Image (tube, rainbow, N blue to C red):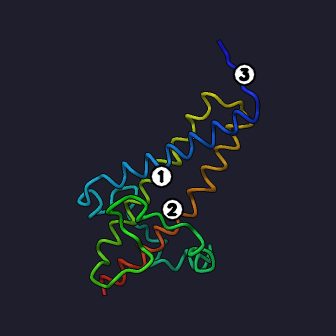
Amino acid sequence: MVVVLADWLIILLNVVVWFGWSVGIGYVGHRLPHAVFERDSRLTRLRAFESRGRWYERRLRIKRWKDRLPEAGAFFAGGFSKRRVARAELERFVAETRRAELVHWVAMALWPVFAIWNPPWAAAVVFVYAIAANAPCLVVQRYNRARLVHLIDR
């Protein structure tokens, strides 16, 4: 049995589900133990091309736009805001960039679930949204980590 929904209902359902699971994924990521993020995984390890963050500065001009993204590190109680970080907190900041990166990868990777109730045009819109909403955040996390790791190593 196929259920056909009005376009406005599809859009509303997508917004509600996307918001709900983004908060849910963020909460699960927040609840994971800090020790999980003390070291890089295959997914989060820095690549040679990132070159202490310089690639992001030259190719993506990240310094122009990164501060315009929302910072939700302290959204949940006990979270870690990255707006102002003391030197003693740099290791924690690095771990939090891994946590945030994982959350954004998971949120983006789950977009195919929307194909269950969406017609192809709406699934395509959700795919574009998944990339547009998460890729800039991923880039900023990797850029910050590349710079911080270099700073810590010095």
Residue at horizontal 53 percent and vertical 48 percent from the top: 108
Q: How many marks?
A: 3
Q: Which residue is mark 3?
A: 4
Tag 3, which secondary structure? loop
Q: Quadrant of residue 101?
A: bottom left
Q: Position of residue 32 (x, y in %)?
A: 29, 52
Q: Which residue is mark 2?
A: 138
Q: Is residue 15 above or below residue 137?
A: above
Mark 2 or 1, nearer chain start: 1
Taking the view exactly as shown, the residue that stands out farthest to the top is: 1
Q: Separation of disc 1 and disc 3 at Cα?
A: 30 Å
Quarter of the image with the C terminus is bottom left
Q: Is residue 90 above or below residue 46?
A: below
Viewed as shown, does residue 13 lie left or right of 52? right
Q: Which residue is mark 1?
A: 105
For badge 3, the amino acid type reads: Val
Q: Separation of disc 2 and disc 1 at Cα?
A: 8 Å
Q: Are marks 2 and 1 in contact (CB under 8 Å)?
A: yes
Q: Separation of disc 3 and disc 2 at Cα?
A: 35 Å
Q: Position of residue 104 (x, y in %)?
A: 48, 54
Viewed as shown, does residue 126 lie left or right of 81? right
Viewed as shown, does residue 21 lie left or right of 43? right
For badge 1, the amino acid type reads: Trp
Residue at horizontal 71 percent and vertical 30 percent from the top: 119
Q: Position of residue 148 (x, y in %)?
A: 38, 78
